[in-house]
Image (tube, coloured by chain):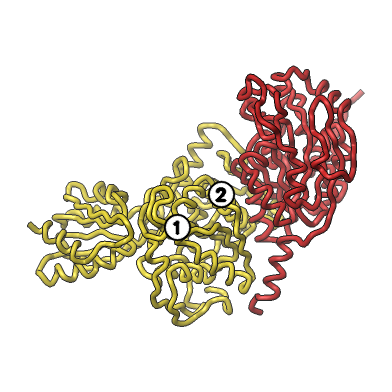
Amino acid sequence: MSIVAQEHPLTEYLRTDRVPHIWCEGCGLGILLNSFVQALKDLDFDLDRLVVVSGIGCAGRASGYIKSDAFHTTHGRAIPFATGVKVANPELKAVVISGDGDLFAIGGNHLIHAARRNIDMLVICSNNFNYGMTGGQVGPSTPTGARTMTSPYGNIEHPFNLSALAACSGATYVSRWTVLHVRRLTESIKRGLQKKGFSFIEVIAPCPIVYGRYNRLGDGLDMMKEMQAHTIIKHGIYPTEATIEPGKEIVIGEFIDIEKPEYSDTIQALIEKYGSK
Amino acid sequence: MAEKRTVFTGMHFVNGDVACAEGAIAAGCRFFAGYPITPATEIAERMALRLPQVGGAFIQFEDELGSMAAVVGASYSGVKAMTATSGPGFSLMMENIGLAVMTEAPCVVVDVMRGSPSTGQPTKAGQGEMMQCRWGSHGDYEIISLVPSSVQEVFDLTVEAFNLAEQYRIPAFVMIDGILGHMYERLVIPEPDEIRIVNRKKPSRPPEKYIPFEAEEDLIPPMASFGDGYHFYATGLTHDERGYPDMSIEVQDKLIRRLSDKIRSNEDKIIKVEELGVEDAEILVVAYGLPSRSAIRAVKLAREEGIKAGLLRLITIWPFPTRVLERLSEQLKAVIVLEMNYGQLVREVERAVKPTPVTFLPKLGEEPHKPDEILSSIMRCRR
């Protein structure tokens, strides 16, 4: 019997010469990346129009594995970089893939302002409840009481509800999924890619090697089972009502899908009106 | 040649900030991201008004961190991009200036310098960031930094900064002292075909053969833009010629040397100075920006007294014109350095003219040096 090596069906979207990737066993980022490239394939998305931008951290490495134009920026600055990309060439679709710390701590100001402007950009935020790359420190989404290397007695702070913050800041599309909900996540990414406006997708991803270990949550599979047990789908509720309490209840679903004038379109309208012909 | 219909050819009476914005537009700048800050705000205001007229985009950002990141992003979309700020904002831009250096993004950063450090004197002037523009971001790198001394020169050097940024794929700086930013003078904007424009090298290879950070003989890699179909990756991490992260000693060594050497090996082409009475000078005044204008008067007065005084006005401050000063040092008995700070470029001058004695005249708190003060110093040097 001969073994026939088959090419992975998504290799045309991936920089295969960058494999193996840097992510740990049981990490959710591989699933997130898979969902993203599956969405590109399903839509037959024009890669010449796509620019993937990321910040710093584990999720920040995602841009380096996608075979489109891509840029790995400084910590927290993926969104303003992508804003420059999009406004300078409105034909492009900017996608930011980054983590909760990059997007909501050091880069938090840019996220709320980009949502306020309603610039056409899809932001996919991997939320693993801690800073994984640097070895597990407390972050803006770490649940109160959770142990990390910088909250050794349990987190004394209150976490952000990331989806709620994006929605309240003006995002025109907001959803939350976990890496367990691959089909729904992929469909949501497809919606975000097609949406003209600021879209935000929060993806709950297990970090078994760092966060999971400090909080005795077991391996990747155990953390996925935990997600399965505690997630509830509630489409259409305003995300301030979408509870996120790992181990108790995580409300997921498609929360916001509204229309508003888009920023780069508005700039083009100014040029049309005031430009010298 | 500059784009027609976008350049306000003719004679104007404007301040340095407006001249800077018009220079940027003449150079082909079509993207500005910035945050209001005295005394640079008028550049942003002018760009907000002018960019839509010429098909460009203005964004007022939430801060200077975002502004600088957006400038790098716009540059990668293939558009000439600029930001303008003053001391506190300049400090916030430093990390992403390093990103522009590391990813070789052509762009222009304007710093209209106020009194510093910290919040300092927002409405006053200084020359406090002469070292910061060179060394402000972490690590080893080279940039190009220009200092104008008149409103006309603000226009001219802003165009030149874009040309140098595009040619060498670096952030180029225009360092304007706050007085000049707000000072009104005559500005003559030339015909578009009289304005020299340089654009970045584009790849001549097809996408499948494009290696984004493979330099040519001039140490500069051709630059594809996002959306051109080249599907390339760039990172602030140390990277190989493909743009892929690489933590090896060899790749770091090769990259950092090239990023610096592309400027160092072209110093003679880049550096510009202006000389007044330097040929036979025994006492040399070294100045830049507004104080150099007082120095012209002082040197003329000294010449009337029969003193062999000269002025070397620095236009390019980085790369520093060390060799120009080294060459002059043999004929010099004394050097006087004027700065609106407490001693920055004077150190570079001292190194270059050693063992010629150097007198330093600092000015802190808005006013540039008066011709009489400079003349007294020249007289003391003669004794």
Chain label for disc 1:
B
Residue at the disc numbered 2: B65
Measuring 25% from the left and 46% from the top, which residue is drawn there? B351
- Circle 2: is it few (<14), some (14-19), or many (20+) Cα within 10 Å? many
Q: Position of residue A251 (x, y in %)?
A: 85, 35
Left or right side of B245 for B296: left
Three-letter code, disc 2: Leu
Q: Position of residue B176 (x, y in %)?
A: 40, 61
Three-letter code, disc 1: Asp
Inspect this view and state whether residue B269 appears. no
Measuring 53% from the left and 57% from the top, which residue is drawn there? B107
Q: Earlier in the sequence, mark 1 or mark 2?
A: 2
Chain label for disc 2:
B
Measuring 53% from the left and 76% from the top, which residue is drawn there? B7
Residue at the disc numbered 1: B111
- Circle 1: is it few (<14), some (14-19), or many (20+) Cα within 10 Å? many
Where residue B368 sits, quadrant-wise, is: bottom left
> Which chain is represented by yellow in the image?
B
Instruction: Depth check: give the residue in front, B171 or A131.
Output: A131
- The tint of chain A in the picture is red
Instruction: Depth check: give the residue in front, A59 or B211.
Output: A59
